[in-house]
Image (cartoon, helix red, strand yellow):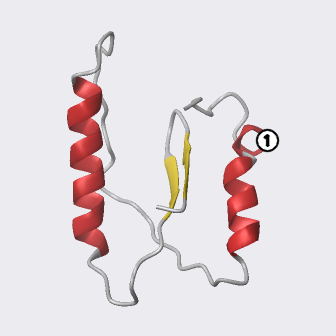
Amino acid sequence: MVAVAFLRTHVHLVIRTEARFDLPYLMQIIKGGSSYAASRAIGNRVGLRWERQYSVTTVSPKSLPQVLRYLADQDRHHPGEKVQT
């Protein structure tokens, strides 16, 4: 995992993988593991619910700095939605 931005309504991840990688399996692990952990967190009464769908976009090494800035700038893109980690 290169970077992550948690928001109240969605999550942005930047993940570096091999060219041929089983992304659906990785998403299953991420969604399942995070839901399991969140539902057992002290004080969490509703757990974590994921949508069925997700989107994947490839990022070239040249555009990676711009994408990382976008993730770091989530307060501006989604005011009030950023979850502090």
How far from the left and from the top, in percent, is residue 18? 39, 85
Please identify the residue farthest to the top as the structure is shown: 43
Q: Where's the C terminus, which quadrant?
A: top right
Left-right relation of 41 to 79: left
Callout 1 secondary element = helix
- Which image quarter: residue 27? bottom left
How far from the left and from the top, in percent, is residue 81? 62, 32
Please identify the residue farthest to the bottom as the structure is shown: 19
37 w.r.t. 45: above or below: below
How far from the left and from the top, in percent, is residue 56? 46, 71
Name the kind of residue labelled 1 in the image: Arg
- Residue shown at 72%/57% (left/top)? 70
How far from the left and from the top, in percent, is residue 71? 66, 53
- Which image quarter: residue 47? top left
**How many marks on residues?**
1
- Residue shown at 31%/82% (left/top)? 21
43 w.r.t. 58: above or below: above
- Which image quarter: residue 3? bottom right
User: Dot 1 surroundings within 10 Å: few (below 14), some, or many (20 or more)?
Assistant: few
- Residue shown at 52%/33% (left/top)? 8
- Residue shown at 40%/90% (left/top)? 19
Please identify the residue farthest to the front as the structure is shown: 2
64 w.r.t. 71: above or below: below
63 w.r.t. 51: above or below: below
Residue named by callout 1: 76
